[in-house]
Amino acid sequence: MIAPDLLRRLRNDLPMPATIAALGRAGPPSKVSEGYFRFLCPHCGEMRATVNPRNNLAHCFCCKKNLNNIDLLMTLGHDFCSAVVLLERWLKQYQARQAKAKSREPPG
Ligand SMILES: [Zn+2]
């Protein structure tokens, strides 16, 4: 049984660009254009899946499908449980990096 709060955090608190960076070569090709992070849509194969930073959801402007972190991993062949395990690990790493970057900022 996976806690609903964990699923919410995996969808919202780990930015999709961080997920795609963590996937490395296993992940879809991506680029930043016009200030938006875009990646190759796993449904239609067009470079039109665009991450909305407000809700951390990718929307493909070609086939109109939406993807969150969990959906993305499942399109890459993970089952639901292994997607959750991976994302939870990456979320922890991401938050550790954020905390470290913050501690390096000058006081005040
Ligand atoms: Zn698409």
Image: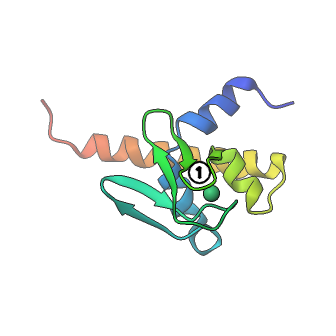
Q: Quadrant of residue 98?
A: top left
The quarter holding residue 23 reads: bottom right
Near mark 1 (Cα within 10 A), the count class, few <14, some 14-19 or many ≥20, is: some
Residue at 29% across, 41% down: 103
Vertical side of 94 occupied by 53: above or below: above
Work out whether residue 23 or residue 97 is closer to the camera in this orientation and state it: 23
Quadrant, the C terminus: top left
**From the viewer's perspective, is 78 left or right of 105?**
right
> What amino acid is labelled 1 in the image?
Trp
- Which residue does the image show at 48% across and 54% down from the upper left? 17
In the rendered image, residue 91, in percent from the top left (x then y), is placed at: 57, 44
Q: Quadrant of ligand 1?
A: bottom right
Judging depth in this view, the residue of 53 and 90 nearest the camera is: 53
**Vertical position of residue 17 compared to residue 99: above or below:** below
Tell which of 33 and 73 is nearer to you.
33
The x, y position of residue 57, in whole percent, is: 55, 41
How many marks are shown on the rendered structure? 1
Q: Secondary structure at mark 1?
A: helix
Rendered-image quadrant of the N terminus: top right
Counting from the top left corner in percent of width and height, residue 14 is at 53, 43
> In the figure, is residue 26 to the left or right of 52?
right
User: Residue sitting at 64 percent across and 49 percent down?
Assistant: 89
> Can you give x and y, in whole percent of width and height, for residue 11 in the image?
61, 37
Placement of 53 over or under 30, stated as above or below: above
Most extreme residue toward the bottom, as rendered?
Answer: 25
Q: How is the image coloured?
A: rainbow
Q: Is residue 47 left or right of residue 72?
A: left
Say which residue label 1 marks.
90
Ligand 1 neighbours mark 1 (CB distance < 8 Å): no
